[in-house]
Amino acid sequence: MGGYVARRVLQAAGLLLIVSMIGFAILHLAPGGPLSQFAAGGDMTQEDLDRLARQLGLDRPLPVQYLDWLWRMLRGDWGASFRDQQPVLAVIGSHVGATLELMLSSTLLAMIIGAWVGILGAVRRHSLFDALATVGAMVALSIPTFWFGLVVIYVFSVGLGWLPAGNRTTIGNESFLDQLHHLIGPCIVLALVSTAVWSRYMRSSMLDVIHQDYIRTARSKGIPERRILIHHAVRNALLPMITITGLHLPTLLSGALVTETVFTWPGMGRLFLDSISYRDYPVVMGILMFTAVLVLLGSLLADLLYHVADPRLGAHGA
Amino acid sequence: MMPEAVTDRGALPAALAEDEILAVRDLSIAFQTPAGRLAAVQDVSFTLRRGETLALVGESGSGKSVTSLGILRLTPRAPFCRITGQVLLRGRDGRVRDLVALPEEAMREVRGRDAAMVFQEPMTSLNPVHRVGEQVAEAIRFHEGLGRRAALTKAAELLELVGIPDPRRRLASYPHELSGGMRQRVMIAMALSCEPQLLIADEPTTALDVTIQAQILDLLRRLQERTRMAVIFITHNLGVVAEIADRVMVMYAGRVVEQAPVRPLFGAPLMPYTRGLLRSVPRLDLAGLGREKLAAIPGTVPDPLDPPPGCSFAPRCDHVEPGRCDAALPGLDLARPEHRVRCVRWAELAGGVA
């Protein structure tokens, strides 16, 4: 087990290196640059701009800039924002809570609803419910997140006035209930795709399990059908879902980016978009690396959890 | 010229006799498939006494497994599968129930308590994510209403009974930590956990290697002597039949084609199909003597969606007589006491061949 984790961490390090190179290259190849933001102000001479470029190290060749960034990174120096000179880690730190809150709550919502829809669809296969769930999942997967977010705002905030149209809290009222109230809209929007994914995978996983010999054995013992389903079938059907959830993490993150923007949610997604439009290289690279680590950590965690949950892999696994 | 045909229907008693555990009457099982109605089992009738072992023999697709699943109603539910006929089972409480007509909830209580089953594949028949102790104790908890600890204690006793060493420690094992033979012992312990009246063993030794097979057969025989339960033993291995069965029922294409106590069946089989089966068994005592070739039965089982008219074995039979064999389905004749055969020519063939 220890060797396995070490191997995975090494792989992850290699992956992070590649991600950082590609990210760095794409970012610097994009037209414009941090200096154009300052130039747009109009009260800077070319001389001022050159001096700024020297200060920020932007006048050096790209590979040198990258190696410099990498070297600082390896020593734990994430750099400072071009915009306000705040350390990148502090900027990310002040936004990560909102994103995690949104992601965890929507994942939880998607798991619970998706699992039940999938289980019921498998148990009552070919029923009206199953057909509706199948169509519903297709629709949910096809709806663009930004559009669904706008619809939710239009219907529930503008039309019915039930939900706030954005932000994490009402200014001046930072009670738990108020936060919860703000969370409902973005949580549902972000959970839509995940719920569809969960219900489809759960359904097929359940169908696999229901036809296994050990389910017939359980039935031959005369234990109640509910117990057969939950104790024997669902317990096994959930195993592959651990992996699915791990693999779904990147989709969830990119969904969070869009959702946060639509709902003006003060999370990393919005910070990322804002930083890109300001060409705030250190923050963009910081968020890129941070989310890459998050995704890799998530998939590693999913694999480790799988080993814990499946006794066949358990202590003797890999 | 023909002996008087006694159909099963007329010969059966109206209810269970004193020492009878099970009476199956005209059991038919049909599946609804996209290609049409598939009659997997047709008009199967037999009775089983306390302590008796009935071997159900036939090749793949003969309906022997479906028959056994149908008795406990473990086949898919209606409308995908329809079971008709009667399955009278004497429960542990002495009451006789017709399992075909029983509501699902009452049927669930019969399973595992009055009648239990051991399956062919010990590798896949145990739940991989639960400890074997829990799995053996599960039926005890639900049928006997014992608490978890008490049920586990009983599970340990059962594991000891079926010859698993260090049973208390084995309770905590997962199925993958046990060998095939040990897993099958666990399956048997699980089936016996509520001391059922009837044990259905569906090819319990087929997936095991030969030495383990013998151990499992021996175990089943000892347990049967001890509990006096009735056993339906499904197999295609005639060597196993000779060893364990009191009576034999040969099935072909969903129908019983011959039914007899084990000695007459092996000594003087009447149905050409049974003879073919017996000839296709490798015999060590003849090996190297006559350089006799193994006689396989040519052809395959007929398509159950499109059965031949008349005798279903006729297309593969050496003794087929066009006009007679394919005219109408032969009845299950009582040829000798306790010996029934479904063949229009059995009397002529018995004179000439046997």
Image: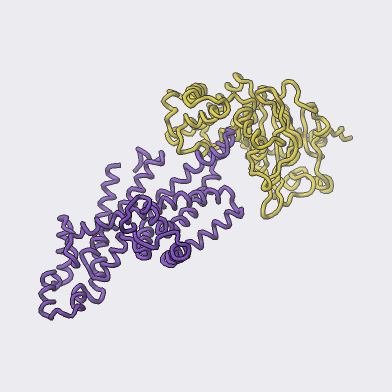
| Visual hue assigned to chain A | purple
> In front here: A40 or A252?
A40
> In front here: B159 or A177?
A177
Taking the image as shown, residue A268 lies to the left or right of residue B173, namely left
Q: For the C terminus of chain A, which image quadrant?
A: top left
Check the image and report above or below for B122 versus A153: above
Taking the image as shown, residue B69 lies to the left or right of residue B174, namely right
> In front here: B310 or B35?
B35
Q: For the N terminus of chain A, which image quadrant?
A: top left
Q: How many marks?
A: 0
| Visual hue assigned to chain B | yellow
* Residue A240 percent location from the top left of the image: 44, 48
* Residue B328 percent location from the top left of the image: 82, 45
Q: Residue at x 77, y 35 (%)?
A: B341
* Residue A155 percent location from the top left of the image: 47, 64
Residue A141 in view of the camera: no
Q: Residue at x 46, y 49 (%)?
A: A112
Q: Residue at x 78, y 44 (%)?
A: B311
Q: Residue at x 58, y 21 (%)?
A: B222
> In front here: B322 or A94?
A94
Extreme-top residue of the structure: B226
Taking the image as shown, residue A139 lies to the left or right of residue A315, namely right
* Residue B225 percent location from the top left of the image: 61, 19
Quadrant of the image occupied by residue A186:
bottom left
